[in-house]
Image: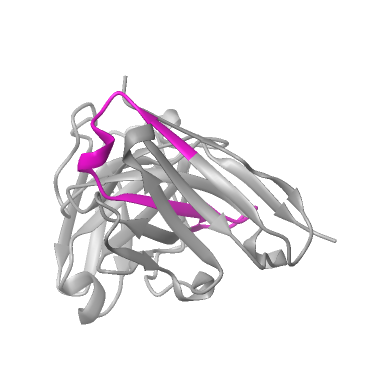
Amino acid sequence: QSVLTQPPSVSAAPGQKVTISCSGISSNIENNYVSWYQQLPGTAPKLLIYESNKRPSGIPDRFSGSKSGTSATLTITGLQTGDEADYYCVTWGVQKLFGGGTKLTVL
Amino acid sequence: EVQLVESGGGLVQPGDSLRLSCAASGFTFSYYWMSWVRQAPGKGLEWVANIKPDGSDRNYVDSVKGRFTISRDNAKNSLYLQMNSLRDEDTAVYYCAREEHWAFEIWGQGTMVSVSS
């Protein structure tokens, strides 16, 4: 069982918006940066968000991150079928903690 | 092109040892913290260990402490993971990753380690 809690699955229709939550405690999320990763089936994870709300170059602005207190959120707008993937949050202490992952289905 | 390529995975028995390698190219390897992250079949991601650019500081997840050793050779642009006393629960795809901006910025394609009798 992961220290960081994510919903096992979320779904939405193409073009809609979806949010994925990542809940922890003050010793992990509240006091550390959060990053988010997308893992398409059969591939390595890819960085989507770093320092809680920044996007690497090449990541569309449809992907955004936020953090408040002991929770972080990944928001994806304008959903596309190609966004179907597993999404993971990570907090950055000495120990790097992953959330359990969320499977996104685009209906 | 920035690239990480893992190798060394395979099928071993419980109690055996295995050494994974990660070859880095396209960037100055000696500038970066590096990590190993693993993913058991059908499961989520788990950080395993990381190492400072000069190799002077290493950190491990509790479940591998005393069994796994992370190391690097900056002259060869290579990262390693020596895995001893392997257990069934160590079965996973092992990824190496470059750390930057408090995140795993670049990932390799992974190498599969299977521990089974």
Q: In this rendering, does residue A107 appear at all?
A: no
Above or below, comparing residue A62 to residue B34 in the picture = above
Viewport quadrant of the N terminus of chain B: top left
Above or below, comparing residue A85 to residue B84 in the picture = above
Q: Residue at x 35, y 46 (%)?
A: A37
Question: Residue B74's x, y, as percent?
Answer: 32, 39
Count every numbered label the image shows and give the total: 0
Q: Report if residue B1 lies within the magenta region.
A: no
Q: Report if residue B37 lies within the magenta region.
A: yes
Q: Furthest residue to the bottom?
A: A26
Above or below, comparing residue B72 to residue B4 in the picture = below
Question: Residue B3's x, y, as percent?
Answer: 38, 27
Q: Residue at x 56, y 69 (%)?
A: B67
Q: Furthest residue to the front?
A: B75
Q: Is residue B73 left or right of residue A60?
A: right
Q: Give B46 or A78, whichever is nearer the viewer.
A: B46
Question: Residue B29's x, y, as percent?
Answer: 28, 36
Image quarter of residue A68: bottom left
Q: Residue at x 73, y 67 (%)?
A: B15
Q: Which residues are magenta?
A: B22-45
Question: Residue B76's x, y, as percent?
Answer: 38, 33
